[in-house]
Structures are given as C-alpha cells and as structure tokens.
Image: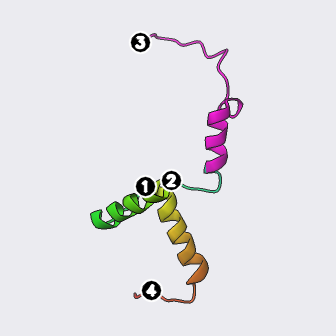
Amino acid sequence: MREEYDFSNAKRAKDIPHLSKLQAEAKNKTCVIIMLDNEVLQSYREKAEAKGLPYQTLINHTLMESVTYRTDEVLPA
C-alpha cells in the first residue's frame, strides 16, 4: 500500500454514468437497518426474485402502500 495516492485525475461519481445513475436512484432515500423475521425476509426474497426486482424494492413498495392507503388504521400501543 502506498503512503500517498494521486487523485488529481480522479472523476466525480456524477461524471461516471453508472455511478451517476445509482446516485439519482438513491435520492430521497435513507439507508436504515431493521430486524425482520427470517420467514418474512425469505418470503420477500422469493417474491422479488419471481418479479425480477431487488427484495429491498419490494419491501419499500409494500411499506409505501401501507403508508399511502392505510393511514387511518391505528397500531396497537
């Protein structure tokens, strides 16, 4: 490993097409860590694979539907 690296010719992520696309997709999102039951996670992975989607996208879609369409329901305390 070098003691110093020359980044003078480095490009910004926004100037590299595939990295720019990833940054654009990540806007308005926050990375969080949650604990899910193994059965829940496995179910989402299987459903997502069948639909050709990342499982995180499917979980996010389900949560968005819950927020959008079921806001009048009250969770137990």
> Is the Cβ of the residue at disc 3 closer than 8 Å to that at disc 1?
no
Q: Earlier in the sequence, mark 3 or mark 4?
A: 3
> Is the Cβ of the residue at disc 2 closer than 8 Å to that at disc 3?
no
Viewer-proximal residue among 32 and 36 = 36
Instruction: Name the element at disc 4.
Output: loop
Instruction: Name the element at disc 1.
Output: helix
**Residue 11 % position (x, y):** 67, 23
Q: Which residue is mark 2?
A: 31
In this orientation, does residue 47 appear?
yes
> Is the Cβ of the residue at disc 3 closer than 8 Å to that at disc 4?
no
Disc 1 marks which amino acid? Answer: Glu
Q: Earlier in the sequence, mark 4 or mark 2?
A: 2
**Residue 70 % position (x, y):** 55, 84
Q: CA distance from mark 3 to mark 4?
A: 54 Å
Magenta stretch: includes residue 34: no
Q: Quadrant of residue 42?
A: bottom left
Q: Is residue 5 above or below residue 41?
A: above
Q: CA distance from mark 4 to mark 2?
A: 24 Å
Q: Which residue is mark 1?
A: 49
User: Which numbered mark, 3 or 1, is in the foreground of this view?
Assistant: 1
Q: Which residue is mark 4?
A: 75
In this orientation, does residue 35 appear?
no
Residue drawn at x 64%, y 20% is: 10
Q: Which residue is mark 3?
A: 1
Magenta part of the chain: 1-25
Among all residues in the image, which is located at the extreme right? 15
